Amino acid sequence: MRLHVIARGKIGRSPESELVDRYLKRITWPLKITELPDVGGTIPAPPAQHREVLLDEHGQHLSSEQFAALLGKWRDEGVREVRFLIGAADGHGESARESADLLIAFGPMTWPHMLARAMLAEQLWRATSILAGHPYHRAG
């Protein structure tokens, strides 16, 4: 199953980009990154079997174990791609929220989208590590 991060805004060369790269390089699952301008641009067409996850301040709060279990479930069901959409400063429109399979939030605080991208990269690494039985994740 491919993980596809679709993010608004160019991360460029920054401390956030270094952090994102650090975690994404560790992921052994197929992975694609698509950057779009803050406004406009075309979101790539999804494959037939996909799930769409929006990072949204009103989304569910999942533990790392719950997030990993969900990815594992989708993988086992034959989902070909999970798309993680990170919006620009104004977030996502209502139609995008309604059509998404899942909305997730990294807590009740609002995070800059560049930090949200780094946090997502780490959680994807953590989830794939949990599913692989790697000792990186230590449940409390």
Image (spheres, rainbow, N blue to C red):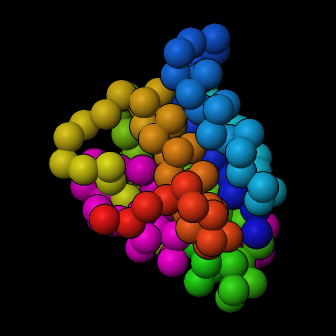
Query: Would residue 11 be found to the left or right of residue 61 on screen?
Result: right
Say which of 7 and 13 sits in front.
13
Q: Is residue 54 magenta?
A: yes
Query: Would residue 49 be found to the left or right of residue 126 on screen?
Result: right
Outermost residue, top side = 13
- Position of the N terminus, as image quadrant, is bottom right
Say if residue 140 shows up in the picture: yes
Query: Would residue 95 be found to the left or right of residue 140 on screen?
Result: right
Question: Residue 98 occupies which quadrant of the picture?
Answer: bottom left
Say which of 111 and 34 sits in front.
111
Residue 34 in the image: state x and y as whole percent: 70, 38
Q: Is residue 92 magenta?
A: no
Residue 76 in the image: state x and y as whole percent: 69, 86
- Position of the C terminus, as image quadrant, is bottom left
Query: Would residue 71 be found to the left or right of residue 26 on screen?
Result: left
On screen, 60 above or below 19?
below
Q: Which residues are magenta?
A: 44-70
- Residue at 42% across / 30% down in the picture? 115
Say if residue 95 shows up in the picture: no
- Residue at 57% across / 37% down in the picture? 7
Outermost residue, bottom side = 77
- Residue at 68% across / 88% down in the picture? 77
Question: Residue 41 occupies which quadrant of the picture?
Answer: top right
Residue 91 in the image: state x and y as whole percent: 37, 39
